Amino acid sequence: MKIAIGADHGGFELKKTLISHLESQGKKVLDLGTNSTNAVDYPKYARLVAEAVASGKADRGVMIDGAGIGSSMVANKVPGVRAAMAYDLSSARNGREHNDANLLTLGAGLIGGNLAAQIVDVFLNTDCTEPRHQRRVAMIAEGAGAASVASASSLGGDFADLSEEDMSRIVTRLEGLLGGGSSGGAFHAGPCVGSCPTTAHQFIELGARRLSHGPESPGKVPEELARYIDHTILKPDATEKMVQDIIDQAREHTFRSVCVNPCWVKKVADGLRGTPVLTCSVVGFPLGAATPDIKGMETRKAIRDGAKEIDMVINVGRLKGGDDDYVLRDILAVTDACRDGSAVSKVIIETALLTDEEKIRVCELAKKARANFVKTSTGFASGGATADDIALMASVVRGAGMEVKASGGIRNFTDAKRMIDAGATRIGASASIGIVQEANQSTVSR
């Protein structure tokens, strides 16, 4: 496979990183510039990449600017090009599976090199095979996508079969551009984004798309970091006033999401209405011992109450006992409900209680159930995430376009960096970063 790649001055460094990544995999790369950080106009390079794809000089294209949006607009003006901007693994997979996109645009100002490499891998290794999606891709090629809403009825069944679920997924992806994302984890003390913004930036540069933030975190969160924050309160003694404080803080800072126990979902969703902040709920939390039907009902109730993301805990005992069929039903009860309600599903596997063989098995089950994420821990068990856990989990699920969240047990910046390098795209250490004082100290000492 030959890949055409281009960038403006803002994307030059990321382009170098991705070229090295692609060449290490044996892929042929056609570098179309720019070749320095001197200021240039991105439309010129976006068109070069698009024309290389349209002419057959390259099988796929990758174009990088500050946000990825402008280059996508330019590329889509070239006949034969279907450009898609991606900001996470799910959007990259969706662009291929649903739209057979042949050109990927990335925002160097939004994602780090590690995450960008993962996005490119998903984009290059995912195919559009579903007949209904292929039919719609053909409509795009024929110009049917430009038809107005008023004339949609003239297309008959081809357009009419867009289900409510399809439309909900489209809306969910648009919401994701404004504020989609992850849940939280248990509370872990440590320096917060407000007191350690430099460290937060370091995580984001490494590829983390989300950080957790607890109610007791001191310091004002910098505005540019707020959209990376999941504001979380899962304490068993959380009162209504404490939850209201979380809502008020989320509205003030415009965090990405608020994660709470099920009894508070409606209050949070109502309190966040009119904002881009999403609501997340946990299911079967923290023991995972409820039956699948109860977890399914709990999920549906949370979604009805306003949850857009669900973190479910697996039945650890059933997994350790070898009853994989039960565990699959357990996960499916939640992921099916999430698909019906257009919510993101995350599977907490409680790594501290599992052997490596059990971690692999449950990740395979989560993949089979088409979950969006696997997550290391609740924070209520004997331990949390380790770099080895993340590497193992990512090796199982990454090919399916799933993501991995590292939550709990993150004690220092070195460990966190290893986890992000190994495949974690989200970090849960609920005093927002919950780690890495030595990272700031080392910065000061240099």
Image (cartoon, helix red, strand yellow):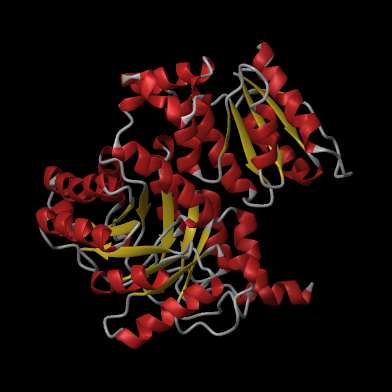
Residue lying at 65% horizontally and 31% vertically, measured from the top left: 62
Dividing the picture into quadrants, the one containing residue 43 is top right
Pick the residue in front: 312 or 247.
247
Which part of the image, by quadrant, shows the N terminus? top right
**Which residue ends up furthest to the right in the rendered image?**
38
Residue displayed at 55% across by 56% down: 208
Question: Quarter-wise, where is residue 381 in the image?
Answer: bottom left
Seen in the picture, residue 7 relative to 326 is either above or below; the reply is above
Residue at 20% x, 56% y: name it.
Answer: 300
Q: Position of residue 215 (x, y in %)?
A: 44, 81
* Residue 80 in sight here: yes
Establish if 430 lies above or below 3. Answer: below
Spot occupied by residue 240 in the image (x, y as percentages of width and height): 31, 85
Question: Residue 63: where, in percent of width, then height?
Answer: 69, 34
Q: Residue at x 34, y 22 (%)?
A: 132
* Left or right: where 25 falls relative to 276: right
Q: Quadrant of the C terminus?
A: bottom right
Residue 371, position in %: x, y? Answer: 31, 45
* Image label count: 0
Q: Nearer the viewer, residue 93 or 321?
A: 93
In the image, taking residue 63 as reference, residue 93 lies left or right, namely left
